Amino acid sequence: HISLMIVTPTILCCLMIFYASFVAKPSFKSSAKILSGAGNANSQVSGIAAQFGFRMPASQSEPKWVYPDIIKSRTLAKAVINRKFDTEQFGEQKKLLQILTYGNSKPNKDLKILEMDAISSFSSMIGVSENITTGIITLTVNASEPKLATDIVNMLIFELDKHQKAYNSAKTNKTRKFIEERIMDTQKELSDAEEILKDFIDRNRRIENSPALQLQRDRLAREVSVLIGVFTTLKQQLETAKIEEVRDSDYVIVLDPPVIPQNRSAPKKKLMVISAGLLGILFGLIIGFIKEYYENSAKQNQKKISLIKKNLSKGFLSSMPFLKNFIKN
């Protein structure tokens, strides 16, 4: 069955070449390596808040486990799919939502459903891997056009940095408000303590010979001194919090920026054709064995039938003299 072994892989290879050339959609991959730059962006403010019992989330100081989750989150996907990109197939300044769903045709679904479909498609396009030792995150995007893949990576990095800035700014703002409230409370306590000390001094101008009055005055003065120290510290920390709030930190450090891919990542024609050829040879072997089995079975059955016919004919001929004598008598 040599012809079968040649024809089967040839047909599969031709079909695979046709599929890879005309049916399969090309895909281009663009990647970038990033590193979190926000590890110590708000550590000072976090320390300030911790001194007064206000705990800030650990995500600011532990971005390693947060960043891959943020990149794959629906929040970030929703921000990116509503951005506009230039494409050769759909034209310039088209939303990624339109590119991934209805293209140049009219949308036939509700906007929320289209948005969910676009988020699902976008999530399947991106890949995130992290080196636990170095903390470097590799971000990859597969798209139908090389420039589109690069633009999506850049937009993803921009939205990630924007998201982190907004998140940390909100937390710093919350800390600042907490410190302002503590300043107001401390200022009121300080004013009350100063009034109590002033009234005590006005009522007791000669306390040299009274240890009890001296002790009470020292306690009141110590209370005022402590409150003054707390108030001064809070004012300093408030200024620090305000500086951190307007500070423009780089929360995403780009180590390797994305570049426009020159070759498509899929479909891989050579690999697909080689795989089709090997699969065709395997199918040819299987079909050949099956065909050979049935042919051998048919030959064996034919031999058995011939042998039976031969035996029957011999038995018939051997019985002929008996029949002749029977007829004669």
Image: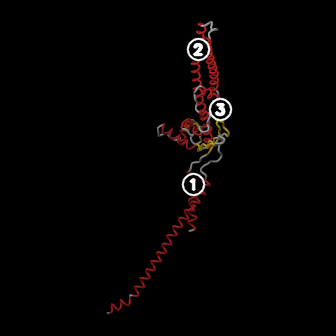
Please tell me which of labels 2 and 1 falls first in the chain.
1
Per the image, label 1 sits on a secondary structure element best described as: helix
- Depicted 319 relative to depicted 195: above or below: below
The local crowd at label 2, few if under 14, some if 14 to 19, many if 20 or more residues have their Cα within 10 Å, is some
The residue wearing badge 1 is 18
* Amino acid residing under circle 1: Phe
Please tell me which of labels 2 and 3 falls first in the chain.
3
For the point 64% across and 19% down, which residue is it? 229
* Amino acid residing under circle 3: Asn
For the point 59% across and 47% down, which residue is it? 27
Name the quadrant of the C terminus: bottom left
- The coloring applied to the image is secondary structure
Q: Identify the disc placed on residue 171.
A: none
The residue wearing badge 3 is 40
Name the quadrant of the N terminus: bottom right
- Please state the horizontal and vertical placement of residue 172, each as a whole percent of the image: 60, 27
Q: CA distance from mark 1 to mark 3?
A: 55 Å
Q: Identify the disc placed on residue 193.
A: 2
